[in-house]
Amino acid sequence: MFKKRVVLHFPKELVDKPIVYKLVKEFSLEFNILKAEVNPREEGVLVLEIKGEDTDLERGMEYLKKTGVKVQPLSQDVSMDKNKCVDCTVCIPLCPTQALVRNQNFEVEFIKERCIACGICISVCLYKAMSIRF
Amino acid sequence: MKTIKEINEKIRRGEVVVLTAEEVIDFVDKYGFKKSAELVDVVTTATFSPMCSSGIYFNIGHSTPRIKLSGGKITLEGVPCYGGFAAADLFLGAAALPEDDPRNKIYPGEFKYGGGHLIQELVSGKDLLLEAQTYGTDCYPRKQLKTYINIKDLNEAVLFNIRNCYQNYNVAVNTSDKPIYTYMGVLKPNLGNANYCSAGALSPLLNDPYYKTIGIGTKIFLGGGIGYVAWWGTQHNPCVERTSKGIPKFPAGTLALIGDLKNMKANFLVGTSIYGYGVSLTVGAGIPIPILNEEILSYVCVRDEEIFAPVVDYAKDYPQGKSNILGFVNYAQLKSGKIKLGNREIPTGSLSSLKKAREIASLLKEWIKEGKFLLTEAVEFLPSVDSGYKFKPLKERRPKDV
């Protein structure tokens, strides 16, 4: 058995389709919902922990991508090295979930709970202050 | 009216009144303009931004037997150094890349390591591997060298910033439908973000718009140590359009800065990796402005909302050298985190760290108050608005066909 944590983005037109049901039925996957929401743009976001055989997991993910669901790995292990960060703020508009914000003292803060581990900040930080560990 | 000599006397006596360029605005609001011109002696300004036109020159001392590095191939940790000088002098540029760096072959390139990172490592005291192959002469017979060098053993190690402290700069946006990777950072498609690079009202040359105090020989804070204004910087362009208060509405004046690398600190000289673009060095600089009279005070009272920067499209106009601009925004808007361009609200990001600039302005203020830093008189002024001095584009001329 393998375990995977993923963030699924459902476009508007898929929000009412029984997609996760198929993961169970056709690919024998177990799932646990960590977080689910429909955001103001009516896009659905689902954070799942999925368990199953290696090949089933792979096929399940393939299926999701084919339906139009965007699949991203989730990791709570994105971290900011405050010794490297110079508080420039260049990362802030690039973070898709507002996990990087600027406070009143013009310092950059990382709000881990909002992070979906997309990895954008890791590439764009000029000082390599952001890192990810899977 | 005060002279720099009088201000230095006050510094020595510990009676000097120093404020940062942000603090002076509130001070004048509180005490009034005329009174403030008497009370305030020095205003400190600062900036902390990536500046690719930086480099270091250093002398490694002579080996036994002697080797002549000029004319040879020299690398420091795989990064090429320029050795076209006498036997033991080298220059390393902040934007230099290791020969085996893939650049943008895998686009966008990561540019993890280069000249800027090396300069930071040298400053922090790390041993760095120098390798050289060259030709022999009767007086310099040796042809190969492979040795670690350390900043403490170098005869001279000097930071030379041929351009810094840009007086205002473009706000970069992307009007195309793809992300672009620029020296102004990653720009999201369809005006997804707007990046700027100035400390605004805290930035040195925006507080001395006509260069009436900052000139050749001005002593400054540079990279955590002491430096001087060596010359005007490359691409100095004082004659651009200005506001009624004299603030340039486009990138204008620049400074060339020089200082002893051995006294600098790694937290004010930081190696920089610009995704899809290259490597650079982020340099902290702080410049004191002596409040000699009311006119100088009026300049340092400049506010973010009075400084306008042009919004430039880095997808189409900038790469093609077109002078088209999409509009002007002020630094109060930029620093608020979003600007408005037409009906569009665009989130902003800064390459220049206001937090670090504030730290530098405060540090310089402390140095002056503690009597550790005296002001200098400029030995010569920089070309200003009446000079006709211009930043020209390249006129390409091909060799004639035979």
Image (cartoon, rainbow, N blue to C red):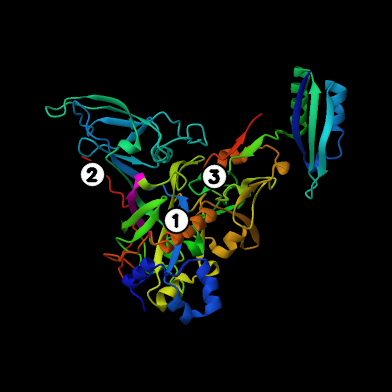
Query: Mark 1 belongs to which amino acid?
Result: Lys
The Cα–Cα distance between marks 3 and 2, rounded to whole angstroms, is 37 Å
Task: Report if residue A110 lies within the magenta region.
Answer: no
Secondary element at image label 3: strand
Which badge, 3 or 2, comes first in the chain's sequence? Answer: 3
Q: Where is residue B392 in the image (x, y as percent from the top left)?
A: 33, 57
Would you call the spot at circle 3 few (<14 residues within 10 Å), some (14-19), or many (20 or more)? many
In the image, farthest residue toward the front: B13
At x 77%, y 30%, the residue is A64
Left or right: B309, with B225 as reference point: right
List the residue tagged with mark 3.
Answer: B180
Task: Report if residue B256 lies within the magenta region.
Answer: yes
Q: Return the chain for callout 1.
A: B
Residue B194: numbered disc:
none
Q: Position of residue B378 (x, y in %)?
A: 30, 65
Q: Where is residue B360 in the image (x, y as percent from the top left)?
A: 47, 56
Of residue B190 and residue B57, the one placed in the foreground of this image is B57
Query: Mark 2 belongs to which amino acid?
Result: Lys
In the image, farthest residue toward the left: B138
The Cα–Cα distance between marks 1 and 2, rounded to whole angstroms, is 28 Å
Secondary element at image label 2: loop
At x 58%, y 50%, the residue is A89
List the residue tagged with mark 1.
Answer: B322
Is residue B129 placed above or below B232 in the rendered structure? above
